[in-house]
Amino acid sequence: MSYPAEYRYTKEHEWIAVNGGTGTVGITDYAQNSLGDIVFVELPKLGDVLEAHKIFGSVESVKAVSDLFSPVSGTVTAVNEELVGTPDKINTDANTTWILKLDLADPKQIDGLLTAADYEAFIAEETGH
Amino acid sequence: MAEVAATLRKTALNATHRTCKARMVDFGGWDMPVEYSGLIAEHMAVRTGVGVFDVSHMGDIQLRGPGSLAAIQQLCMNDASKLAIGQAHYSAMLYPNGTFVDDVVVHKLSDNDYLIVINAGTREKDVQWVRSQIGHMPGVHVNDFSDYYTQLAIQGPRAAETLQKLTPTDLSTIKNYWFTWGQVCGLHNVMIARTGYTGEDGFEIYVPSDEPTSGRVWNEVLEAGAEFGIIPCGLGARNTLRLEAAMALYGHEISDTINVFEAGLGRYAKLEKPSFVGLDSLLEIKGAGGPSRKLIGLEMIERGIARDGYPVASLDGTIIGEVTSGSPAPFLKKNIAMAYVPVDLAVVDAELAVEIRGQLVKARIVPLPFYKKPKKAV
């Protein structure tokens, strides 16, 4: 499993890529692997105002449902409509299959998130390896 | 290192599952594979080809001796006197109030010898129950053989062709819910039963539970089925397969708070038998006009997946019941569920709603089972 070094991560297993004032959010390779075959993604609407660490949607595999948490606060500017018909794209490539883009309310919040190394260490602890 | 793992029970195939890249989970105290290559692929393999499951965590109780039939008859609701040697049937052990201790498959091994296959999660409870109910009866000896067998389920339309490569026994002579003993992978007197929990044709074989033998048979089954696309299947696919076939799961559709009629399993309760544990209550319920709630099948109309425990509501939002099992159905490609609702609302084609995380999502009542295996062309 791989975790791009340029992304930041949450303990709820989301990643965020930042480009200027825009953040792009997805779930990690670890998350998709734990969930198994993903069959449903509940997306927010354009213009929704998200709060850091609050639920904005959910992702469901055949056997489980998992809430999605926003890594940072911001306003939704795009959602990946492709996931309505082909949610399993997240299984194929979690690192490039984004769920939403948002205008960051406070870019400094990014500094509070995990780096790739932090996240890998966190997972290692969680899984006991 | 073994300290954490030691608290979970393992089947003889535990190391083999890890070699097969299984994702392991704690399933009722057992360290079991939930999936290998992926739940959907595993489910589809069983519906269209063949898959193999390790179901060694299931329990096996043997009743032996001249009193064994009398004991079975008292213990289980179905009529075991109708069984021929080599025949099995679905049955259940009930509490005196007509609810479930467990659902079981009873196999008649000989006139004085029966094997009851029980669920993994209820093993200890079941064994204690059996001893408490019939231990005093004359001429019957209760043996817990649960750890003696590695039980493999080879399931799917190509299951017979797969297993036939490993045994000289003519499998076409074994009818559904019958069994025999034969040579399998060079092992003598292996019990070969045409049973399963997938809604598909298939076999369950009972081999000695030592690790080398278990691993060898598992690998030979995979090799034999390779030409038919066999893959190892985990408990995830086992659950979705049984749900499509609307087979009950203990703790979900049946439990110690649900009675036989509610669960729609009345046809397996032989009320004309002189006596069995639970009979009086079943007669009473029947005399009072039957159960007040009923198990139904639901198919989601609107976008959403019903899950175990979600409330079921009428369209105006009144809560009327609860989902017992719900999931996407990989073969049917629908979101399905089973649920208990009041009998007068259990009308096929009626629309209800499932409350999914605070939202009412529409569903339609459909007949059970959701899936029936196609009849073989003659």
Image (cartoon, rainbow, N blue to C red):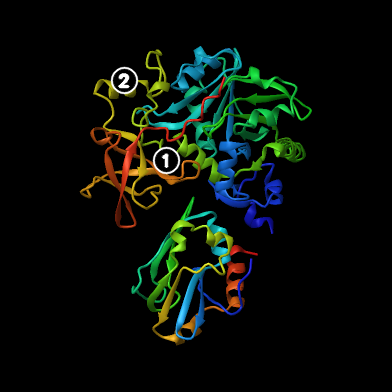
Q: Residue at x 33, y 21 (%)?
A: B280
Residue A95 falls left or right of residue B284: right
Task: Quarter of the image for the C terminus of chain B: give it.
Answer: top right
Q: Amino acid at mark 1?
A: His
Q: Residue at x 55, y 67 (%)?
A: A28
Q: Nearer the viewer, mark 1 or mark 2?
A: 1
Residue B264: % across, % down: 37, 29
Residue B283 — which label? Answer: 2
Observer able to see residue A40: no
Task: Quarter of the image for the N terminus of chain B: give it.
Answer: bottom right
Q: Residue furthest left?
A: B316
Residue A82: % across, % down: 46, 62
Foreground pick, B205 / B240: B240
Element at label 1: loop
Residue B2: % across, % down: 68, 55
Q: Amino acid at mark 2?
A: Leu
Q: Which residue is under mark 1?
A: B252
- In the displayed structure, B292 sits above or below B86; it is below
Which picture quadrant has residue B277? top left
